[in-house]
Amino acid sequence: MHNATKLRDLLHRSGIVTAVGAHDALSAKLVQEAGFDAIWASGFGISAALKCIPDASFVTLTEQLDVERNMVEAVGIPIIADCDTGYGNALNVMRTVTDHERAGIAAICIEDNVFPKRCSFYAGVRRELVPIDEHCGKIKAAKAAQTVPDFMVIARTEALIAGWGQEEALKRAEAYAKAGADAVLIHSKSPTFDELKTVARKWSGRVPLVVVPTIFDGVTATELQEAGFKIVIYANQVIRAGIKAMRDALAVIKHDTRPGAVNDRIVKLNEVYELVGVPQMEEDERRFLPVGAEQITAIIAAAGFEKQLLPLIEDKPKCLLDIKGKTILERQVAALHDCNIKQIALVRGYKKEAITLPNLRYYDNDRYEETGDLFSLLCAEPEMKGRCLFLYGDIIFDVAVLQKLLKSPADVSLVVDLAWYDQRQRGLPNLPTKPDLVMLQTPPGASYLSRYVLPEEENRVLKIGQDLPHDLAHGEFIGLAMFSDKGIEAFKRAYREARKKYEAKGFHEAGTFLRASFSDMLQELIDTGHTVSSVPIFKGWVEVDSFEEYQQAWAKIRQ
Ligand code: SPV
Ligand code: MG
């Protein structure tokens, strides 16, 4: 729908249409946000804001249109362009119409000042009007040039401003309406509304009346409507508000020197981000840029204390266990960095003061003895925005494993090692520890079992847990998961609901909600209808959960 049709629709509505003067895309956006019907692309405001020059035909058609195009891009409400005298004679007006229609402008307003015009309120300047016929010629030319059926031409007379009296104003308004104007604006600088009220009473009603109550500023929209006006333009209050706010803030900073001294006078940065559309840009990045190029936050849960690892972990948490010259944590961070993931949060608990690796954001679970790893992860809830990785603090994995996970398009993806299944199928003993076992929708097929070709298609996880009967299990969740922005929001929602529901009860395999593990929450997600997908791997990682595993890690890890 052309914006002109939107403006026509507004005029067909009962009540007065409210338009507000804007001088750029941002101010136009604010006008829209405030709930007004339309924008007035103000010559006064654009001269001041764009070039800081008088409103006197110095801004060219091209310059004005550039600003108007920016406004059209920024808002959905119709824009009425203040075209002063139309940028020349009747023929120039024709081009003005064509350019404005193409730019998506709903209406133009042309006034009967002689070119170059002067703002209606400058006191000590020359003021001349063109003959009535000449202005009627411009209006006829504008209407002849128009191709968008609903495009509007508003004719403005400055007769009252120039001191030519009410009769002349009405005569001109009538002539302009007869010439084809879709509305007329009779401008006035009288300090009270009385003058225009009288003029409006005498108006034939041939076309709607437009009013700009800049000087008679005590009048309400209802009073204007009752007097017969259909469009009110609040022409310059926004730019004047801006000048005052900027001046005041500048004075405070100059005096105080701390930028924070103006915090109560300025919007938060986030409000600017919202206004200019940063959330949409973030969403687009996630949708359209290759995975890995976007910002991903990794959250490492490393709060727990594993008695069976004593005395190895007497003075440090297990993520600081050294394996061939590097700690588990250093190896994890290096793998994340290799995949360009720099936003890393870590939840500490047991021996938290020992973890001092720089450039991580730390969260503490001081209740690590009485809580499970789900509680630990949620200590870093502020980090759970956009695409997120969850990692157990005791796993070491090949970068290829992480790279494969990062390519997953699913909202919730778990890395599942199928080697566990293979061991079992071949009758080999599985390790004595209790892994998070996973049952998949489609069991690993024959091609996998004979040739270790990993399936590419999405394979949903149906069940997950340490107590899963071994004959139902197809693999082992390695403690590395990824959530899309949609997935992480669903995860947080499901967590909040589960906390309410299970607060004092057992939760899946956990005796209490407080002690729940991440895999309990994954099972809850599945049970509440969410899709949890698997990213299959075959080995390529180790876990350090016992002394034996620690020894094996030493044996497996390359220097
Ligand atoms: C403008 O905003 O440029 C106008 C309205 O023409 S006024 O300045 O009130 O005349
Ligand atoms: Mg103007």
Image (tube, rainbow, N blue to C red):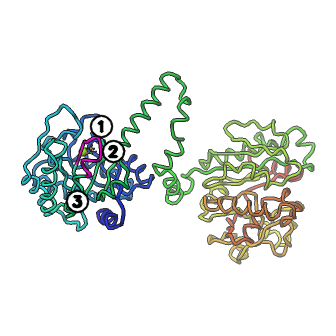
Of callouts 3 and 1, the N-terminal one: 1
Marks 2 and 1: in contact by CB < 8 Å? yes
C-alpha gap between disc 1 and disc 2: 8 Å
Residue 510 coordinates in the image, percent (x, y)? 86, 62
Residue 340 coordinates in the image, percent (x, y)? 59, 47
Of callouts 1 and 2, the N-terminal one: 2
**Residue 391 can be seen, yes or no:** yes
Q: Please name the residue shown 14% across and 40% down the image.
A: 116
Q: Please name the residue shown 66% across and 38% down the image.
A: 359
Other-residue count near label 2 (Cα within 10 Å), few / some / many at <14 / 14–19 / ≥20: many
C-alpha gap between disc 3 and disc 1: 27 Å
Of the 4 image quadrants, the one containing the C terminus is top right
**Which residues are drawn in magenta?**
187-197
> Quarter-wise, where is residue 325 in the image?
top right
Q: Tell me which amino acid carries mark 3.
A: Ala
The residue where tag 3 is placed is: 183
Residue 375 coordinates in the image, percent (x, y)? 79, 53
Answer yes or no: disc 3 within 8 Å of ligand 1. no
Q: Tell me which amino acid carries mark 2.
A: His
- Residue 48 numbered mark, or none: 1
Secondary element at image label 3: strand
Is 416 placed above or below 383 here? below
The residue where tag 2 is placed is: 23
